[in-house]
Amino acid sequence: MQIRQTRRASPDRIVLWGAPGIGKSTFASKFPRPIFIDCEDGIRAIDGNSFGVCTRFSDVAEQLKYLVDNPGLCDTVIIDSVSEVERFIADGLCQANNWKDLTTPGFGNGFEALRGAFLKLLAMLQQVNNAGYTVVVLAREAMTSVADADVGKDYVQMGPAMHKKCVEPLTGWADFVLAVRRPVILGAQAKGAGQKQFAAAIQDAVIYTTTTAGHIAKARFPMPAQLEFSYAAWQTARQSAATTTTNATQNETNNA
């Protein structure tokens, strides 16, 4: 049995989520030599490449397998979007089992089946990543209720528009979970006890890299908590993180 160094260079695994029309696909198209796994037919105005529009999960699986079997076709594989792929998986399960929807089998079994099938998708994406591709997974946004045992009540959090049984393994797998949101400046409509707040201004979209009570985000490497929503800003921050990681590795080697 061989002991291996855990720190190693590998292509990134990125989840990017945000509201429809905010610019996720355009942002992803700026990555080096991208190819889209197009599940929404929403990239007609974007310069890029794809194998054609997927309409079922078998299309997605076939395209991913082709990329694994033919390394070097591109540098970046973009799933657009995983929210739609999840729907493909759910539709396939319902059709195969003659279910009306995922609640039909009862006791949460339909959603457990969804999770199991989604884990197979993640295994495929990891094979793509192992073949040398950066993987960028796009997702629409949704509001979810989070139970907080510390405060004894639920609160609302924004995140990828998927069932929680799929969100958890997806965000666990990714190196980066990037939340694209437009910061809102609140104003007050009236003073006193009856004061109500409203959105006084909505700012330009930014990328968040850390989780807050309001949204899900994550970075496995040192990154600013907030970035301008542009590929140039992302590239600069990512290169800085890579340099920091390389220097840390070199220091560990020198001190060994």
Image: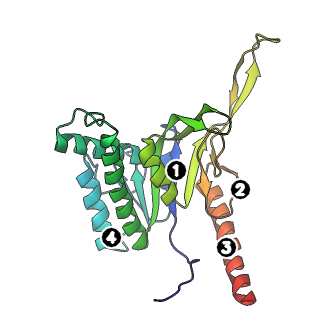
Label pair 3/4, CB-CB below 8 angstroms? no
| Any part of residue 81 in sight | no
Q: Closest to the observer: 23 or 127? A: 127
Q: Identify the image quadrant of residue 60.
A: bottom left
Report how far apart the C-alphas of labels 3 and 2 lie in the structure.
15 Å
Q: Identify the image quadrant of residue 123.
A: bottom left
Q: Earlier in the sequence, mark 1 or mark 3?
A: 1
Location of mark 1 (residue): 16
Amino acid type, residue under disc 1 in the picture: Leu
Amino acid type, residue under disc 3 in the picture: Thr
Location of mark 3 (residue): 245
Q: Earlier in the sequence, mark 1 or mark 2?
A: 1
Q: Closest to the observer: 120 or 36? A: 120
Amino acid type, residue under disc 2 in the picture: Pro
Label pair 1/2, CB-CB below 8 angstroms? no
Q: Which mark is residue 224?
A: 2
